[in-house]
Amino acid sequence: MSVSTPSKRRPSGFDRYGFIKSAKNIGRAYRKQALELIEMCRTFLLASKQGDRQDTELKRVLQAVGAALNSVAEAGKKSSKDAENALQKAIEILAKYERDFHPTGINGNESIEKRMEAAQKKDKTSSAFLLFHRKRTEDADDWDSKEVVHVRFKVLSSPVDKEPQIVDQILSPKPKASEILWNLSRLKSGKHKRIALKDNPHFYSDLPHSTVEYQDTFRQRPIHDFRFDDTTSPSGPEICVLLDKTARVFLETKNKTRTFGNVWRPGRAMIFKGTIFARPFG
């Protein structure tokens, strides 16, 4: 599913300048590698065949990748041995997970190691360019003239949550999911709860607000292709975000095993996050 819900206007009270000024240097020295890790982990999270053992190992992967992303963020725009060691550890654990559970590959034709090597080269090229060719476009003042979009995310504990966590972000008009997940994982603690890969966020352009609308025929696919174009809408794009809970639900049938991180029971229907399966109680 794709979404096209754009606007360049933003609600009052959002400090666009302050957001860009604080965000532009977070993890910049290893940004490409961080985004590549997120993209590959996201692919594994969305893989359909999962069991108890695989889910346990995937948690180990996400923990290692989460630690690497934290080290990358702390490094900022400077090189860091801690960040490099954490990245290497995450790559090794991620590659082992793929060999054990997806031996034919799931992240494209290239191996995880080669994809990370390519990202590392891009980071080095980017760092060298910034070091020797300081341009005014790197200043926060000039970011306001770039083609960026203000997007509001509503983080819900359930589809009918009356008090969602509101998160404002500045994104490119056609961001990858990895860019969005990187931003959400770097939220400042206190005001906003950080959204980690292990939370397995799914994004929706809109969700019904009333429980009566969630019947056994309810279907809603998450967004995978983000597009924010020009519009005259005064409110700007709003995206609903649903997270996993700490408890897990395992469904095993003759042909398929699935793991679900969140299930709701509005009325007589069961709604499973991340799937289009719903079944009423008889």
Image (spheres, rainbow, N blue to C red):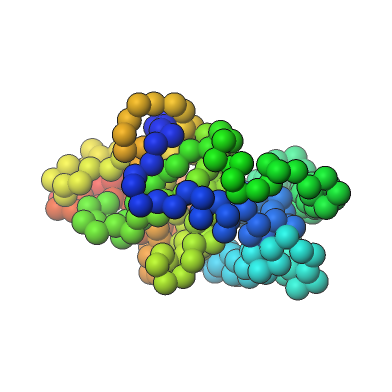
Q: Identify the residue at image location x=40%, y=54%.
A: 167
Residue 98 visible in the picture:
no
Q: Residue at x 47, y 49 (%)?
A: 16
Q: Is residue 190 above or below residue 265?
A: below
| Residue 227 visible at all | yes
Task: Judge from the rendering whether residue 193 lies leftward or rightward of residue 161; answer left or right.
Answer: right
Q: Position of residue 148 (x, y in %)?
A: 53, 37
**Could you tell me which residue is drawn at 25 percent across and 40 percent down?**
218
Q: Nearer the viewer, residue 252 or 128?
A: 128
State the residue at coordinates (29%, 57%). 164
* Residue 11 quadrant: top left
Q: From the top left corner, tell me how far across and down residue 97 is, in percent.
A: 67, 61
Which quarter of the rendered picture does the N terminus lie within? top left
- Front position in the image: 235 or 123: 235
| Number of callouts | 0
* 14, 267: nearer the viewer: 14
Q: Position of residue 75 (x, y in %)?
A: 71, 67
Q: Nearer the viewer, residue 276 or 172?
A: 172
Residue 104 left/right relative to 192 = right
The x, y position of residue 163, in whole percent, is 24, 59
